[in-house]
């Protein structure tokens, strides 16, 4: 089996678990829509595309194991997991250790009222995931904590936007973001300015030497450099 057709398991109300075979490369629209008893799904590393509404209204979902190594990005208004898990205690999303990217818009509900009930997102140990696509987890309002794998280098626009209850994010060592770089340089500028002011105060108090002007020039120069390099 290499593909799951349009509406293949639509409305199979007694279906509780799905482990998709490793040869499957695509799932068409509505493949498992309205499987209201489905509690867990495992997406294999061979999958490269998932159709619109594929797991729409799978209200009992509690576990999604995402192992697709290099799946195509999705577009907005795909509703793949919209309303998923709404009748349970929440969905745990586990990203497999061989996944190289989380596709854009994968868990994006388009409207927060359609949000899948994802409560936790975790990366398996030794994860090689390098990117999280744009709006991948947009408006997943119940997620409270995310630990991003150490190999993740890029996080797309709006990846965790409107996650209203997200209180703690642990960012991996390799994330390369212009916004984060600018923030780091801004923080460094603040530290340098505070240190310069303290040094000038001590120099004037202990040795009666005025170095305010020189300290000001150094701080100004660093701030200008940080601003231009972050632009």
Image (spheres, rainbow, N blue to C red):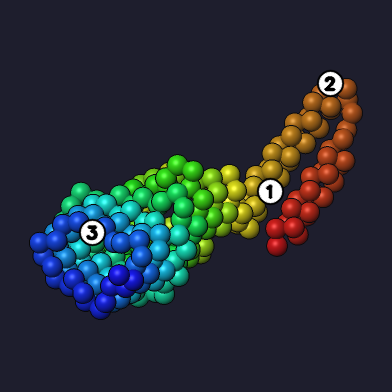
Q: Which of the pair 113/40 is nearer the observer?
A: 40
Q: Earlier in the sequence, mark 1 or mark 2?
A: 1
Give the residue displayed 26% in from the left and 77% down from the top: 5
- In front of the other: label 3 or label 1? 3
Residue denoted by label 1? 185
Element under label 3? Answer: strand
Residue 61 as seen in the image, left or right of residue 171? left
Distance from label 3 to label 1 (Cα)?
48 Å
Locate residue 37, reporting x and y percent.
14, 59
Q: Is residue 207 visible?
A: yes
Locate residue 63, reporting x and y percent.
27, 52
Give the residue displayed 74% in from the left and 39% down from the top: 192
Locate residue 92, reporting x and y percent.
30, 49
Choose top left, top right, bottom left or bottom right for residue 189.
top right
Q: Is residue 132 visible?
A: no
Choose top left, top right, bottom left or bottom right for residue 130.
bottom right
- In front of the other: label 3 or label 2? 3
Residue denoted by label 2? 206
What is the residue that sits farthest to the bottom in this orientation?
A: 6
Residue 97, compared with residue 138, is above or below; it is above
């Amino acid at each position: 089996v290499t593909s799951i057709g349009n509406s293949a398991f639509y409305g199979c109300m007694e279906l509780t678990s799905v482990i998709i075979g490793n040869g499957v490369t695509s799932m068409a629209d509505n493949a498992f829509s309205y499987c209201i008893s489905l509690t867990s799904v495992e997406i294999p590393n061979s999958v490269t595309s998932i159709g619109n509404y594929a797991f729409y209204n799978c209200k009992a979902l509690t576990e999604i194991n995402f192992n697709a190594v290099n799946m195509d990005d999705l577009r907005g208004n795909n509703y793949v997991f919209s309303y998923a898990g709404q009748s349970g205690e929440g969905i745990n999303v586990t990203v497999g250790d061989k996944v190289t990217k989380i596709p854009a818009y994968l868990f994006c509900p388009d409207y927060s009222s359609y949000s899948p009930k994802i409560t936790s997102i975790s990366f398996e140990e030794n994860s090689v995931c390098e990117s999280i696509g744009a709006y991948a987890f947009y408006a997943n309002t119940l997620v409270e904590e995310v630990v991003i794998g150490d190999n993740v280098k890029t996080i797309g626009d709006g990846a965790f936007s409107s996650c209203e209850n997200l209180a703690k994010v642990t960012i991996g060592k390799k994330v390369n973001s212009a916004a984060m770089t600018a923030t780091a340089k801004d923080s460094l500028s603040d530290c340098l300015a505070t240190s310069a002011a303290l040094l000038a105060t001590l120099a004037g108090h202990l040795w009666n030497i005025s170095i305010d002007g020189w300290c000001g020039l150094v701080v100004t120069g660093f701030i200008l450099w940080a601003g231009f390099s972050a632009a």
